[in-house]
Image (cartoon, grey):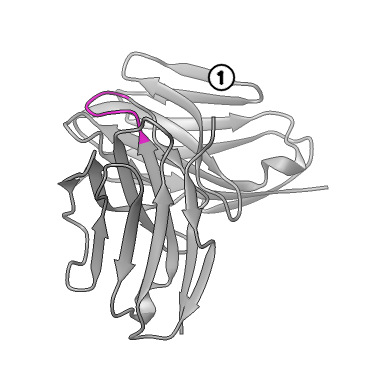
Amino acid sequence: KNQVEQSPQSLIILEGKNCTLQCNYTVSPFSNLRWYKQDTGRGPVSLTIMTFSENTKSNGRYTATLDADTKQSSLHITASQLSDSASYICVVTLMEYGNKLVFGAGTILRVKS
Amino acid sequence: EAGVAQSPRYKIIEKRQSVAFWCNPISGHATLYWYQQILGQGPKLLIQFQNNGVVDDSQLPKDRFSAERLKGVDSTLKIQPAKLEDSAVYLCASSLRVPGNNEQYFGPGTRLTVT
């Protein structure tokens, strides 16, 4: 069964600290993996995208890693800011017609001052 | 470039009532998606259109949900009659075309509360 599992479910950190979010997937065949940021009351916005052959991808203070052998990905946030408070969703694309996305439940991050 | 537009942003109805949501995708995007996102969960695909044709509606509860995209541009999603478990955020997304790794761009969503 195609599934994406994320951990932790929620996380609270102090402003300026780093954090790492985890994603495990069983999606096959695999096309790519995206991390989305979803602010409260908004739709998800793509942060990074990685294909099977890519191990890491950065977008400012966000760095995503991918281990296709163990089917694990992580999103590392450096020097967190209050505006990083959001839900972070791991999404895997099935390699089939339709570009079907398999969503994780998300990790809710709260950055405190 | 304008993003995906959705309306209304919020809707509160009583169970057994009807409701309709509207979506206008990014100009030129052939593919349109409707998702249901229940609190604490990731979005679940309800229906996918390619132009004005349905590509995938396998998870759409067809006894109460319907969607159309008559002219291949904007789309409406309807629920009739609504149930308590339909309370969720309904997200619309669009992408340039399929197949391919074309990114889906999401609208802000419509938050539906069924009482």
The number of numbered discs placed on residues in the rendered structure image is 1
Q: Find residue A35 and report its horizontal and vertical position in percent.
A: 47, 34
Q: Find residue A39 and report its horizontal and vertical position in percent.
A: 60, 48
* Residue drawn at point x = 36 percent, y = 45 percent: A103
In the rendered structure, the answer to whether residue B42 lies left or right of residue A44 reads left
Q: Main secondary structure of the magenta part?
A: loop
Q: Decide which of B57, A21 is in the foreground and name it.
A: B57
Residue B42 seen by the camera: no
Q: Give the class, few, some or many, for how many residues have Cα within 10 Å of label 1's Cα (few <14, many ≥20).
A: some
Q: Is residue B96 above or below residue B79?
A: above
> Magenta segment: does it hold B21?
no
Residue B112 seen by the camera: yes
Q: Find residue A3 and report its horizontal and vertical position in percent.
A: 28, 46
The residue labelled by disc 1 is: A58
SS for dot 1: strand
Instruction: Tell me where the magenta segment starts and ends, as one range.
Output: B95-101
Q: Decide which of A33, B80 is in the foreground and name it.
A: B80
* Residue drawn at point x = 52 percent, y = 50 percent: B108
Q: Decide which of A46, B71 is in the foreground and name it.
A: B71
Given the image, on which type of amino acid does mark 1 rest? Ser
Q: Chain of mark 1?
A: A
Quadrant in the picture for residue B28: top left
In the rendered structure, the answer to whether residue A42 lies left or right of residue A103 reads right
Q: Is residue B94 above or below residue B14?
A: above
> Magenta segment: does it hold B99?
yes
In the rendered structure, the answer to whether residue A100 lies left or right of residue B7 reads left
